[in-house]
Image (cartoon, grey):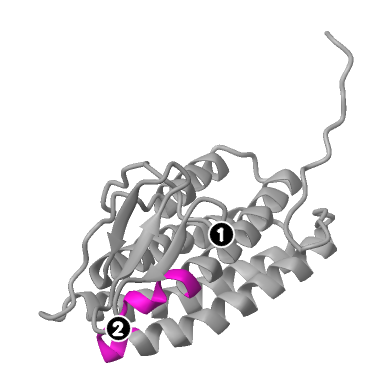
Amino acid sequence: MRAIRPTVLLSATVLMGLPISTGAAQVRVTTSTGEVSIYTEKNLVDHMIIVDSVELEMAELAAKRTQNTAVRDYANMLINEHRGHLESLRKIAAEDDVGRQTSPADTAGAAALRSLTSLAQMAADSGFDKAFIREQMRLHNQEIIALKMFGGAAKDDDLKDEVKRTLPIHERHLARAREVAAQIGVPLDSAGTPGQPTTTSKPPR
């Protein structure tokens, strides 16, 4: 996997995406600090490949480690669907008129990679299951936002179709993650996103 450089995380609270002209398949990205950069088709392809690659590794880790049937079934669903999606994206990236390029403003992949590293260090217990499902809700919610904001950078017909096909898949994965969260006791806020995990104070040793 390529190295991912942390800079500014793509999220609705940090960035604003706007088309810059009717003829150009690009998106103007404005960070919370007022810096502006251009998000291109190559950036979009790179973003989707990186996030899908880390997402696939997370799901493979969970499928091997979890002892919970619902979590394992969910992880296997992610493996099957993200693996196929990743293959399609790599074929699109290999096209001469598409390609891929890292955006210095995009650290969604870096954030996902940090979560994967954290999960890999956890014991195979219910704490792992809850952390995995919390991350799936966060990651899929973020990807839905990102694709809606930056999907307009696609100009290649195959990539346009892939973005259009991917959005409902992320929405379905998010909905299923929320169902599993309810089964294993992960709290959700009113927006259906993971709340803060409950901590139990322990007496000093």
Q: Name the residue carrying label 1.
A: 139
| Magenta stretch, overall SS | helix
How many numbered marks are there?
2
Residue 38: % across, % down? 28, 61
Mark 2 burial class by Cα count in 10 Å: few <14, some 14-19, many 20+: few
- Residue linked to disc 2: 22
The nearer-to-camera label among 1 and 2 is 2
Seen in the picture, residue 71 relative to 73 is either above or below; the reply is above
* Dot 2 amino acid type: Thr
Please tell me which of labels 1 and 2 falls first in the chain: 2
Please say if 131 is above or below 29.
above
Check disc 2 and report its element: helix, strand or loop: loop
Residue 80, numbered circle: none
How dense is the environment of label 1, judged by Cα within 10 Å: few (below 14), some, or many (20 and up)? Answer: many
Tell me residue 194's x, y (percent): 74, 54
The residue closer to the viewer here, 56 or 109, is 109
Q: Residue at x 32, y 47 (%)?
A: 4
The residues colored magenta run 148-159
Name of the residue lying farthest toward the top: 205
Q: In this picture, is 95 found above or below 2?
A: below
- Under mark 1, the amino acid is Leu
Question: Which one is nearer the viewer's eye here, 148 or 94?
Answer: 148
Query: In the image, is residue 137 part of the stretch drawn in magenta?
Result: no
Question: Residue 134 is drawn in which quadrant?
Answer: bottom right
Residue 13 percent location from the top left of the image = 57, 53
Quadrant in the picture for the N terminus: bottom left
Q: Residue at x 75, y 48 (%)?
A: 126
Looking at the image, residue 46 sits to the left or right of residue 152; the answer is left
Residue 121 in the image: state x and y as whole percent: 55, 37
